[in-house]
Image (cartoon, rainbow, N blue to C red):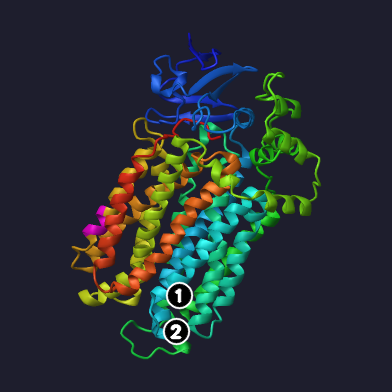
Amino acid sequence: MGSSVQGPNNEVFSCFPVPSHGTSILGSIQVDYGATDTRRPPSYCPSMPASDTSRASTIVDGQLETKIVEDVLPQGSVDPIYQARTKLLNDAIQRIGMGRYQWHLFIVSGFGWLADILWIVVAGIILAPVVQEFKVQGPFLSLATNIGLLVGAMGWSAGSDVWGRKISFNITLAIVGVFAMIAAASPNFTALAIFAALWSVGVGGNFPVDSAIFLEFLPATHQYLLTVLAIWSAFGALFASLIAWAILPNFSCEATATVCDRSENMGWRYYLILMGGLMLALWIIRFFVFTLHESPKYLMGRGRFEESVAVVHAVAKYNGRESGLTVEQLEAAGARDSSEPARREDQELLRQLEMDTSALGAFRRGLKEYDGSLIRMLFATPKLAFSTGLIIAVWAIIGLAVPLYNAFIPYYLSTRGAAYGDGSVYLTYRNNVIIGLVALPAAPFGGWAVELPRVGRKGTLSVFTILSGVFLLLSTTARTSNALLGWNCGYSFTNNVMWAALYTVTPELFPTRVRGTGNGLASSANRIFGVMSPIIALYADLTTAVPIFVSGALFVFAGIVALLLPFESRGKASL
């Protein structure tokens, strides 16, 4: 029969062996566990290794359920009452299971990932025809987009912790679509750069907000899906490349043309109209088709317990389940002994509950409260401060490395092809499509890799960040367009695995109450250094290998820094 496992609070959980091939019930979802599937809860097996005691199984109402009994952040990293209430919400979401709501959220959140990478690719793709038409220095367009991304990352992420995730989630794609379509009519480069910065403000809010809200609705046993979500980035890059391949070679000036009139170079304008229209279509699906609930953990952190519980019940109903969570349970979770005096923060929370609860009142109150306390919470303990500092550093280094190369890939392919004597506009965009195709399996592979024992999030992030740098450095040895394409394919795969791991580990390391702010700080650091990359490109000739050497070395350095992260979030519940 089975054996038992003792939890951290002396509770006893049943432990049952599972055949190497078969099915098991996780909540209400039936999952097929193959022989090599590392997502199988190891606690089902009596020979469970000590490293996997973060998961335990128990029989509830005749069903076998898995419970995550260990959190990403250790006790004392956040307020104990907040931590206890978050655990209660985590348990409620785990009991609901991975159902229709989460899978639909996977799709609409994926739109944000798609847009995030798609517009980096778009800016790079239109660079060559724009430079030909307006006779400007290409890095200035990258500079404009990175400034917009920085503003968006800082504004939307901070706002999501003040007025909630829902508003930011529902508006960003509309901003991108509108300004991209307007940019297609730009009469000069200055207008194009301004509109590129404006559409980038919308793009900059996608990762900080979308990752937070998706993670906060996920059962802890399915947090690896945050890694798989990055497959939408690969779809975005591939779709952008496919459409460019179909349009730009037919409506663009040849790379060798000395004169390039607007009438002969309409391809990039048609391209922006199509990409902007796509964003508006995705926004319509988000806003009118899917009903997004505000994050229950965010609502709990703001003292809005009734709304938090109501959201949990709404998600359970959508999934065809029921939840037994009550407001009384949430309020009582983590309550102190009655003899202990309430802290000033608790009194302030109670005072807030009696305030104006209208949307305008909440907005005004949120702005007053955003006084830096959210940022200070990210550095509340020495170990948490070290973790926050390192993850921001990794994002910053990658923020300089990625646009220094990615933003100019079509330009590199075009200029190198011309130098090798085997390039053309058609081959440039065809090769871009091939590079995009290679990236497709990266996210599923990353989702598997981050769940491997002894590898986890940190190992995956470190190894594939270093490999990204290695492939870039090797690309400088290419002497033909095909050789350059081969090295770029290797870089495309490893770089997308890196992003998948980074997108996963970052929100997991931040408590819900400040997750938007933490994501925003990391993303803002990335965008600040991203602003520096086109400045470097202005002084380092893009026709030489210098920018590639710098980018490759930065990737290797970022991979080494990632190894120093003090927390491993594999198999642990985010707070």
x%, y% of residue 507?
Answer: 51, 43
- The residue indicated by pointer 2 is 265
As rendered, which of 490 and 525 lies closer to the eye?
A: 525
* Mark 1 nearby-residue class (10 Å; few <14, some 14–19, many ≥20): some
As rendered, which of 387 and 498 lies closer to the eye?
A: 387
- Residue numbers of the magenta segment: 470-474
As rendered, which of 395 and 503 lies closer to the eye?
A: 395
- The residue indicated by pointer 1 is 247
Q: Answer yes or no: is residue 188 visible.
A: yes
* Mark 2 nearby-residue class (10 Å; few <14, some 14–19, many ≥20): many
Q: Quadrant of residue 298?
A: top right
As rendered, which of 403 and 225 lies closer to the eye?
A: 403
Q: Secondary structure at mark 2?
A: loop
- The correct choice, above or below, for 428 with respect to 393 in the image is below
Disc number lying in front (2 or 1): 2
Mark 2 → mark 1, Cα distance in angstroms: 11 Å
Q: Answer yes or no: is residue 232 visible.
A: no
Give the position of the C terminus as an image quadrant: top right
x%, y% of residue 315?
Answer: 68, 38
